[in-house]
Structures are given as structure tokens and as C-alpha cells.
Image (tube, rainbow, N blue to C red):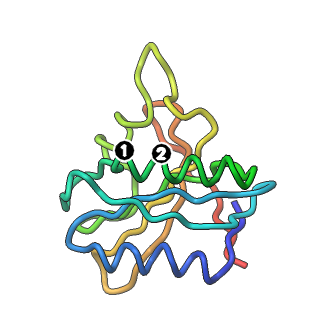
Amino acid sequence: MKISRPLYEELIAHALADAPDECCGIVASVDGEAVAVFRARNAAASPLRYEMDSADQIRIQEEIDAQRWDYGAIYHSHTRTAPYPSQTDISMAFRPGVGALWPGSIYVIVGVAGDEPEVRAWRIESDTPEEVGLNVL
């Protein structure tokens, strides 16, 4: 996925603003390039997991649909660990016997546990996440 520096910085700003709780949201895209970042409220209000607020998710879906954009990525932060999908993240994205719950989705994780934020992107379509490139323009 391609993402402009300002949108990339928006992901980091959201993660830092919501710390010590995890943040969450959706990145809209067109032809594989991010065009907007939509913040959502973490209904779990937890430093260990996220649960996107359903009203925010509907609002974001409606805006993306109205603009005829694509769902580029689902993002959240890790405030205590590296930006690698946790078992909870994997369970929210993939179910054995069912498959990927959001096929083709990219999951962006912003790690804010260290001295500097670290952003990594993943496909979670099995029990083993695969890292994908995040091209910051």
C-alpha cells in the first residue's frame, strides 16, 4: 500500500493521542494508494486490545462508500508490544475452518511502546501473518 507522509503521520498521531489505550480506525484507498484516514473510537478502551465502535464503523463505511473509495486497511496500535499481530489480532482477522474475515485486507499496526513509533503492515489470512510493504511517499 502507498501512503503519503501526512496520512502516515496521522496514524502515528492517533496512536500517540490514544495511548496508553490502543487506537483503531480505517484507511480508505484508491488503486492501492491511501486517500484518507478515519479515526474510530476504541470501544474496549483498553491498552491490550481494540474493538472498533460500531457507530464509528458505520459512519466510516458510509463515507467510504459515498466517495466510491476502497477499504485500504484496518489500523490499530500496540502500546506495550512491537507492531506484530498478537494472537488476539489474528483471532479477530482469521478463523480456522472459516478463513479470513476481511479477505484481502491489510492490517496496519502502529507500535508506540519504544522510543520511536514503528509502523508495519500485515495480511492476516491464516494463522501466520504475512508482512506487506507500506510505501510512504
Residue at the image point whose x is 34% and y is 64% from the top: 23
Q: Amino acid at mark 1?
A: Ser
**Residues at circles 1 and 2 in contact by the CB criterion of under 8 Å:** yes
Q: Amino acid at mark 2?
A: Ile
Decide: is 99 above or below 42: above
Q: Tag 2: Cα neighbours inside 10 Å, few (<14), some, or many (≥20)?
A: few
Q: Which quadrant: the C terminus? A: bottom right
Q: Tag 1: Cα neighbours inside 10 Å, few (<14), some, or many (≥20)?
A: few
71 relative position to 11: left or right: right
34 relative position to 99: left or right: right
Decide: is 128 above or below 83: above
Q: Position of residue 119 (x, y in %)?
A: 48, 70
Q: Position of residue 118 (x, y in %)?
A: 44, 74
Q: Which residue is mark 1?
A: 54
Q: Which quadrant: the N terminus? A: bottom right
How many marks can you see?
A: 2
Q: Label 1: state its secondary structure.
A: helix
Q: Residue furthest right?
A: 31
Q: Position of residue 72 (x, y in %)?
A: 64, 53
Question: Toward which corner of the image does residue 27 lie, by quadrant?
Answer: bottom right
Which label was assigned to residue 58? Answer: 2
84 relative position to 22: left or right: right
**Spatial separation of the CA atoms under disc 1 and disc 2:** 6 Å
